[in-house]
Image (tube, helix red, strand yellow):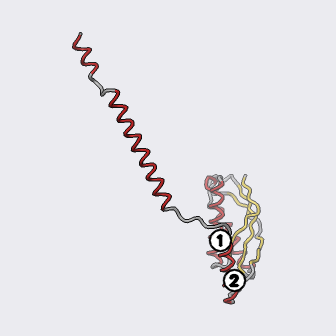
Amino acid sequence: MALVSQEERKKGPSPIIQVAALLVVTALAVGMGWYTGGYLESHQAPVSEPGTIKDQGRAESEEEQVEGEARPAPSVTVLDPITTNLADPTEIWVRMELAVVFDGEPDPALARTIHQDLFAYMRTVKLRQIESASGFQYLKADLRERARIRSEGRVSDILVMTFIYE
């Protein structure tokens, strides 16, 4: 029995060695955290002063006016409401009221073409794509991109006035 009790005591390292190893690992972790924080702080982008972005925007717009490049005023055209069912599940219906923002003079024929394209696109959308807030943002970006492509860049934005699905 004396031999068994001596063998049981020598199985693991002593508590002093364990505490020393823990202190060394903790010191290394603190040192790496301090070094990483200093490194990231030194490579951070400089913070701009408040109001500098507005001043730069004003300077750019003044330069455009001086050069004589007058941008046409945007005009808004309200499209007919779109009411259709979704691709999946097919028993879910969507009603959207949209407006198209044209750069310059609006084109009613182009607005009807954009309306039909957006109507056809909405028939391909699935409910799980649009049921969250980020899904709605993606849908709006898709609609904007389709309108820009269809109008060859004359449409600058799509405004969603009403969006209901049931």
- Where, quadrant-wise, is the N terminus in this rendering? top left
* Viewer-proximal residue among 160 and 57: 57
Circle 1 residues within 10 Å: few <14, some 14–19, many ≥20: few
* Residue at x-position 39% and y-position 44%: 28
In-image side of 113 versus 22 (left or right): right
Residue 50 drawn at (x, y percent): 66, 66
- Please tell me whether residue 21 is drawn above or below residue 134 in the rendered image: above
The outermost residue toward the top is: 1
In-image side of 73 versus 8 (left or right): right
- Choose top left, top right, bottom left or bottom right for residue 140: bottom right
- Please tell me whether residue 25 is drawn above or below residue 37 in the rendered image: above
Residue 146 drawn at (x, y percent): 63, 70
Label placed on residue 150? none
Residue under numbered circle 1: 53
- Please tell me whether residue 74 is drawn above or below residue 21 in the rendered image: below
Amino acid type, callout 2: Glu
Residue 165 drawn at (x, y percent): 72, 54
Q: CA distance from mark 2 to mark 1?
A: 14 Å
- Choose top left, top right, bottom left or bottom right for residue 73: bottom right
* Residue at x-position 66% and y-position 54%: 133
Label placed on residue 62? 2
